[in-house]
Every structure is written in structure tokens, then in C-alpha cells.
Amino acid sequence: MSRFKRITLGLSWFVNILLLFLLLFEDRVQLPVWLQVTGRMHPLVLHFPLTLLFIGILLEFLVTRKTFQHASVRDVTSFMFYLFALSAAFTALFGFFLFKEGTYLGDEVSWHKWSGIAVSLLAVILVMMKESSSSAIYYPTLGLCTICLVLAGHLGAEVTHGEGFLTEPFHKVSNSITHIENADSAVVFRDVVQPILNEKCVSCHNANRAKGDLILSDYEGIMKGGETRDGIVAGKAGKSLLYKYISLPMEDTLHMPPKDKLQLDREEIRLIGWWINTGAHVDTKYVELPKVDSIQPFMLARFHPKTGLDLLDIPFVEYDEIKPLNNPYRTVQQISATKPYVAVFLGSKKDFNAKDLTELKQVARQVVSVDLGNSAVKDNDLRDVAQFTHVQKLYLQNSDVSDDGVKHLKDLNFLEVLNLSGTKITSKTLDEVATWKSLRKLYLYNTNIDEETVLAFKASKQQLDVFNSQIDLTDSVYNAALTSPVIKIDSPFFRNSALADVKLSRGKVKYYYTLDGTEPTASATAYAEPFRISQSGELRVRATMTGWKDSKVVMSPLMKLGLRPPVITLETKPDRKYSGKLDSALVDGKAGGFSRTDREYLGYLDQDLQVLFEMKEPTAIAQLALSLLEDIGNGVFLPGHIEVWTGNDKNHMTRATSFDNAAPVKDTPTARRVVTLSFTAEPVKFIRLKASRIKSLPAWYDQKKGKPAIFIDEVSLEKR
């Protein structure tokens, strides 16, 4: 141990003396390349002395206890402080090498440098004091060293992540309080451009770390423009390097931000380009500028009055907190990627008990929908439903809930939809809900409330939609439809296989499924347990039970990601407004959502889709699959006709296969669809996909909504 101490202390002093010598001749120091690489190891090693110091402090505290006053504990404590001194010295030396690169600038960097050097020197002095038992000044020195280390760490975080990094959550809270209610009152630079740059660019381009001499943390630095002085050319976004670099393809070496950083999305890039073209002014309000059709939707989406639950700024719940709450009879899931709201499904749970709800306390603020339909929920259980103070939709149909239970819901101030069909309520419930100001829809099918009473209630509550009628239950067969199956797929796009799981209902409900696009009937495959799917297609599931109508068919698209062609050419260009990620969108393995505005899609509004895939060498392709959006309400239809052409010369290809989609059906729900085309596999270098829009809109479609469009987010090529 004594030899270790001598070597460690000697090496620590050597590094500190070397560091002081370098500081003395700092202006003359020129670092070779290999030392610059060493300097970049500073972030790698800086956590080591921090950990060692605080472990050492903990051990020092324990030594004051009688039960820990052993020689072995003192030896371990001493060992920790020797390692702390050595690691602090090397961390400070590496930090000096990084500082000399000149990438980091400003007062905070200087303070970080000197506080780090102070830690290194105090660490060596601390070790010597400990060995000489100078307890009178040992503990004050230990305290001073700790303060310097905390200060150095804080300043390092500010340099790396930007000013105010530590207090950023508080700023976000205060920013949410000063929410701008409308776009016209927004100052374009302050409220639009600078927040984008702060989030995506300032970590590398601030006063302390000005890469390329470009500072983007304030207006003056932005307009100064960095080394080339033409980062911003007011009125000319196309000549402004800032706009050029953020607009470059991701694979371009000049693209900014770097690939490993948070990227600007298409909307943010367009907003910055528009600001530059308007003159790049610092204090101009949006209302003072000419309205641009392509920009106005972005501005209106960013600045709008908060209403309802949005006013509460409810925090998101981590996925790891939600996942354990799910089980075979309870589904808890976040219903939006942009809002923190959660839906709970406990429908058809015949052994329901209060625990099923009380276990959800950690997500009570986020729950906005609770489905207890067809379950064994009782009046007293609704006391626990009342804990979900932000619930907007509550489903209690076909349960034993009565007037006494409904009274427990009176404090749900955000409740908009309440389903009491098939319950034991009477007209007393109508008197109760008549005072609920937020209620908008009330379902009363098959209750004990007579028709005349409901009609009178409707007349007195014009703002409330009431749905009621009586179902004839005198027949031996209850002619109601089963609830649609709930399908869970671990990944809609997969490399090898996807796991499909169907949520089972209680009773004698049976589930049948197909994978070939046909309708599932009793002759299809019966579902028994989760299974794996290794092919592209559409999983379709139907629930059946004797005495009930079959459920609606639920469809889930699946795509197996095959070969990724090195060259993809969009021979027809998508609409500029829906150009997504251009050619890379078709092979990035990312599924689009259920909206045509999702940036994963390429949208073809005025022309048909035609894309050419080029392989490195001839490959035997046997199948091509397309992932498409069908949103008939917004004019997005499946292609009317699809063709696949193959060959080894792109100018002389033969048609491998073709496919005609069925005519669109009115009221088809919005969905993602997968179309697969198989053909004879022969080694080819080129594959051309042609997808034609439907020739004419159906007679039942509102012609004012425009031309039929194709929206595609992925193409998969599979070998034989």
C-alpha cells in the first residue's frame, strides 16, 4: 500500500506541476494532433474524481462512528483519496488540452478551467494533510475542494449544454405560464426562430462553445454569421449558409445539426427560411408580415389558446411506469404522442374489483378515458373512478350501476361522454347529470327510463346529445354485436418477425384470423395464444359467439422489412407540401400515423407514383410490399392500379406483376394498409414500382374535397 501511495502521490504532483507549467506558457502552447485526441477524453474521465470524492466523504463520515473505526476502513478511505487526487490531475490536464483547441470560449469556460485546476491542486494537498493528520485544516480543505468540484461540474454543464441548463425545467414551467394565445401577437424571432435554435443548435453554437465562430444564442451572434460572415443574408434564405446547412440531406457531410444531434423537422426549417426571406428582423410581429399560405398553418398550430385539460399542463408519464400496469384483463396506454393523456380499458372483466382501479393511482392525473363496460363494476367502485379527476370519457354500459353510483361522479368536472346503456339507473340520474356543465354526450340505450321522460330531458338540455332506445330482449337470442377485438403488435414494421397478441374477452368468445387479406370466418385459423408473423400482409381478426352478432373485423397492417436498395429514384415527385424525407422515407423502416400530415409519408396529389429501385448487383426479388394510408374522408385512397417492372436495364424492363384494388367503400375508417405483390423471382438489378390513383372519385364522395391522392410511407423488397 505504501508503494502505491508513493507512486500515486508522485504522479499526481508531476501532472499538477506540468499543468502549472503549461498555464504559465499558455499562449505559446501548440498541441499536436494526438494530444487534441487526448483532450477530447476529458468528458470521459471527469466523472471519476467526482464519484471518488463523494465516496471518500461518505467514508470519512462513517469513520466518525465507533462501529466503523477499523484500520481497514481508514485504509479504504485513504485509497479513495489517493485515486481522487490522481484522477483529478489527469482530468484537469485533459481539460486544458481540450481548452487549447479553441472550440470553447467565454468567461464560463475560463472559470471552469480555473475551478478544475483548483480541484486538482486541493486534492493533492488534501492527501498530504490526511497523511500528516492535520485535522484542524483538513476538513475545511475537504469542504473547499468539494465546493470547487461542484462549481466546476456546474460550469462544465453550462458550457456543454448551454446557459441555464440546471434550471431549465423551471424556465419551462414559467414559459408555460406566459403562453402566447394567438399567432398575431407573436414576435417572429423571439417566439418562433430563437426557440427552435435554442433547442436544436445552441448546445454547439453559444458564447462558450462557438463552433465555426457561429453564435446562435442571441440575435447579434446570429446576424454576425460566424467565420464566413454570411450565415444569414437578410431577404435571401437560399444564400444564407445557416439555412443551406440545415436543408442539406442527412448524409451530406455539411448537414447541420450533426446526425447524432436532435434534428430540425421540415416545419422548423421552413419557418427559419421564411423568417430570413422576410428580412430576418428582430422585433417584427407576425401580424405585421404578409400572410403566406404555406406558413400560416404552422403558426396557427404553434400559437393557439389553451382550453380544457391543456390549461393544466399535465406532465407525461414514462413508458416504464405505464407498462407494469398492463395485464391480460387491463390495458393502460398513452393515447397520443404529443399529449400526456392515458386511456384505461377494463371492459368485460367479470371479476372486477376496486383494486383494478386503485392500482392506477400513479397515472390518475393522466387518465382521460375509462372503459368498464360489460364488467362487474358496482356502485361503490365508482368512488374509485372519481380519483381520475381529469376523465373525459366513461363507459359503464351493461353493468349493475344504479343511481347511487352515478352520484359519485358529480365532481368529474371534465366528463364529456358517459355511457349508461343497459344499467339500472332511473330518471333520478337525469336530475343528477342535468347540473353537469361539461357533459356533451349521454347514452341511455335499454334503461328503465321511459321514452317520454327522456324526450322531456332532451328538450331541456339542448347542448347535450342524448342517445336512447329500447332493445327487444324477449327473443332467446340477444341480437347485439360483440366488441371489436383488440390487437397488440410489438412492431408493425419488422426484420424477422412480429408478435401478434389478441386481448381475450371473458365467456365463450372465439377469435378467428387471416393473414392473406380475406375476411376471417369460422373456417379461418382460430386464435389460441400470441403467435409470430414472418411475412408482410394484413392481420384481420373477428370475434364470434353463439347468440351474438359477430364483431366488426379489426385489421392491423404488417410489413417485413427486406432489402434496402442503395439507390432510390423518385421518377415522379411527391407534392411539395407532402414530400416528407423524399426517397429515404420509403426505406427508413418508420411507419406513418393516421394523418396525411405525418412526415413519414410521401403524398401524390396531382400525379401517379413511380419509383425506381437499383440494386448493387442482380438479385432475385420475389415480392414487393407497399405500406399506404387510407383516409377517404380527406381524399387519400389506395391506388387503383399497381404494377411492378423488373430488369437489368432500366430503359428496357418487363412487367413482373400487376394488381387492381377494389373500389373504395363509403365510411371506410382511416387506416394504414399493406399491399403485397408476388412474382417470379429472377436476378434483376432494377425494380420499378408504378401506382396509379383511382381514375375518378366515387359518386358518393364530396367532389369539392379535390382530386384523389396516394400517400405511401414504406416499400419492402424481399428475396426468394
Image (spheres, helix red, strand yellow):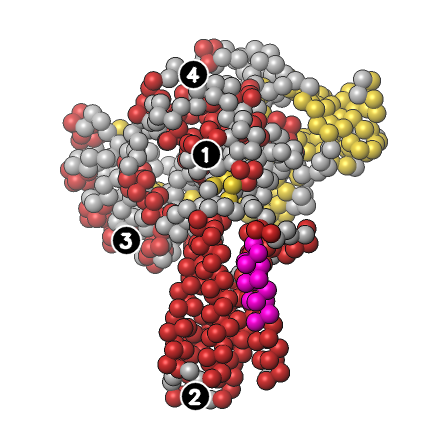
Q: Quadrant of residue 41?
A: bottom right
Residue underneath mark 4:
292
Q: Is residue 447 above or below residue 283?
A: below
**Residue shown at 24% from the left, 43% from the top:** 412
Residue underneath mark 3:
384
**Residue shown at 60% from the left, 16% from the top:** 693
First reached walking from the N terminus: tag 4 or tag 2: 2
Residue 17 lies in magenta, yes or no? yes
Residue underneath mark 2:
69
Q: Secondary structure at mark 1?
A: helix
Q: Callout 2 environment at 10 Å: few (<14), some (14 to 19), or many (20+)?
A: few
First reached walking from the N terminus: tag 3 or tag 2: 2
Q: Nearer the viewer, residue 706 or 680?
A: 706
The part of the chain drawn in magenta is 13-26
Q: Alpha carbon of mark 4 to alpha carbon of mark 3: how far?
A: 51 Å
First reached walking from the N terminus: tag 1 or tag 3: 1
Q: Alpha carbon of mark 2 to alpha carbon of mark 1: how far?
A: 58 Å
Instruction: Name the amino acid, label 2.
Output: Gln
Residue underneath mark 1:
221
Q: Main secondary structure of the magenta part?
A: helix
Q: Alpha carbon of mark 3 to alpha carbon of mark 2: how far?
A: 53 Å
Instruction: Name the amino acid, label 3.
Output: Asp
Relative to 439, 373 lies left or right: right
Q: Do labels 2 and 1 touch, CB within 8 Å?
A: no
First reached walking from the N terminus: tag 2 or tag 1: 2
Q: Quadrant of residue 153?
A: bottom left
**Viewer-nearest of discs 4 and 2:** 2
Q: Is residue 341 visible?
A: yes
